[in-house]
Image (spheres, rainbow, N blue to C red):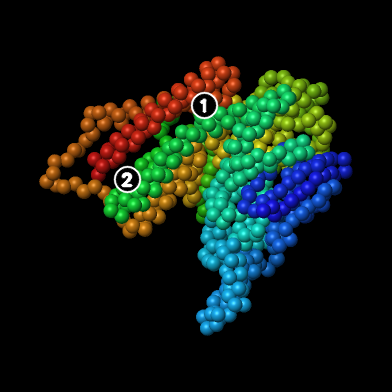
Amino acid sequence: MALINLFNIKKQYDIKLLLDDVDFHLNEGERIAIIGENGCGKSTLMKLATGEEEPTEGRRVVDKSIDIEMLEQQPHFADHLNVREAIENELTTLQEAKKEYELLTEQLATDFDNKKLLARHAKVSAFLDHHNAWNLDDKVERVLQEFKLKEYEDRAVVTLSGGEQRRVALASLILKKPDVLLLDEPTNHLDVYMVEFLEEMLLKEKFTLLLISHDRHFIDTIATRIVEVENQKLVSYQGGYESYLHLKEERMHSMKKEHDNLLRLLKQEEAWLSKGVRAREKRNQGRKKRVFDLRDQAKTNPTLINKMMIELEREQKHFNREEGVSRKKMLFDLEDVCYSIGSRELIHDLTTRILQRDKIAIVGYNGSGKSTLLHLMLGRLKPSSGIIKKGEFSIGYFDQHRDMLDDDKRLIETFCPDGGDIISVQGKNMHVYGYLKSFLFPKEFLDKKIGMLSGGEKNRVALALLLTKKVDCLILDEPTNDLDIQTINILEEKLINFPGAILFVSHDRYFIDKIASKLFIFKGDGVIEESYQSYTEYLAIEKELGELSKLQKEVKIESVKPKVQKEAKVKTKLSYKDQRDLDMLPQQIDELEQKIDEINKCLYDPECYQDKGLVELSAQLEEYQKSYDELSDRYLEVLELEEELSQ
């Protein structure tokens, strides 16, 4: 059943036409993601759906009985409300329905044949069922915890930051569960753990959704359909982001040559999804199956849980790849670095090295100190203790303030400050229009002033300007914020081919998986863990460890260490074969990882995979991945054996 219908819609602002004779329908139970370039009309389409904007032509038909609510970019709260009150204030209707249900239940206990009471009781019960409002107090408590609002629950909402206020508004909406929920960039200001909780709630509660997002992982998890705004028209694609890529490529094949560049990016994206992610998904599914199987076995053999937790924890730890590295390749060398703000320690005894071609994602909870680490690297902050040694090299830095841009300058003046139309891009001369076209700027934008651009367009300019510089290291703080998916694809291509080191802070799991070869994970209380896994895989293991920890408590077990019988003759050291494997496997695993990385890199490059053949590359990748899994399992086995013998 269609809840919102737009027929023959045309929307025009002055001379700018955004939508031209389009139809749009949102059916009950659908979760539609609207995507498209910045400024194409995504937010306008959403506002037309809510009735906030009126179409220039066409009509809007909406079921008047439904409740439609939208997450505002800048929510407003009464000055006197604290965080908990602001959330509970939005749940008044549900709380009153719960009280009425309890009263009706009491009345029916003595008047159980009253048809009027029975009908009302059934109606209120159905209302509470629809909104899943039976245990609201518990749900309020959980959402405060998951959105990191518990510490602010007694604080006035208006004193919080803009991002924190949006979290309060979002918490209210997902608990309220309107018939149709509209979300404009809901994952902005959320860390990855908050996004996972949001995904869980939206799927579990079966929301009808209309959303705008550039978070491809979120879209792929949530969306049942994608609507792309393109050239004033709407194109619909069934399924999530991966399905969209396949269907979009099929459509692009039938279009003109001017779309060759976009088609190439789509092919790279699909190659990455199909070759770089599938093996990890297979391992994740295997782990999930083992956790599921353990639930039945744990009651009779609880030591299995401990064994699997040890395996997962080891899988999260990285192999030391940096032994014997030439000091000439060293960019940063950190020794026992600590940094505190007041009594709060953000970084504790961090010792690590950053090398010439490292691509490192800095990830973790909001407020855990990720951007602080970037500022320490840049020399803008001094460590509380410890040493940061820096080699002789140049750095390009990007943050959300866009300090390198002057609002009064035109686009062409920004890129060609000395006049002319030729710019140097990492040491090579290019025509300014040719370069900016690769960042999706049309020719007429050259004379536009920076101050006239949208936030997303300014970010695109700042990134394009940064990537003209010939530098050895890029340091990027949330580079994908306010960018549309097409621009993020372009940025990814530039970063994958960047010859130097990259350090970046991001919550975008999809972006991190594509760019990073290493993770710095901020765990809280100053603890920073290093890992060479993909971020998605790391999070999957972390989640499974959490489930196993809960399972431990459920079956009331403690960590069991193997007992050594005094009278029995026991092994005191590894066998020759076990010791040999312990010594040699890390290098073999490292070599296989390098081969896998080389094949994945080739799969990004059309010339490379056309030369070597996709079928042959896929077969090699599968063979190397199989060997990698076998050797990794064996290495975990001998590590565990060594640990048992040392006890």
**Pick the front one: 202 or 121:** 121
Quarter residue 436 falls in: top right
Residue shown at 50% from the left, 40% from the top: 536
**Pick the front one: 287 or 511:** 287
Q: Is residue 457 visible?
A: no
Residue shown at 52% from the left, 36% from the top: 388
Residue 517 percent location from the top left of the image: 51, 32
Q: Is residue 4 above or below residue 425?
A: below
Which residue was labeled with disc 2?
307
> Badge 2: how crowded within 10 Å, few (<14), some, or many (20+)?
few
Q: Which mark, residue 264?
A: none
Contact? badges 2 and 1 (CB < 8 Å)? no
Which residue was labeled with disc 1?
600
Residue 389 percent location from the top left of the image: 52, 33
Among numbered discs 2 and 1, the one appearing first in the sequence:
2
Specify whether 64 is left or right of 33: right
Alpha carbon distance from label 2 to label 1: 33 Å
Amino acid, disc 2: Lys
Query: Farthest residue in the bottom direction?
Result: 110
Q: Is residue 571 above or below residue 339?
A: above
Query: Farthest residue in the left direction?
Result: 567
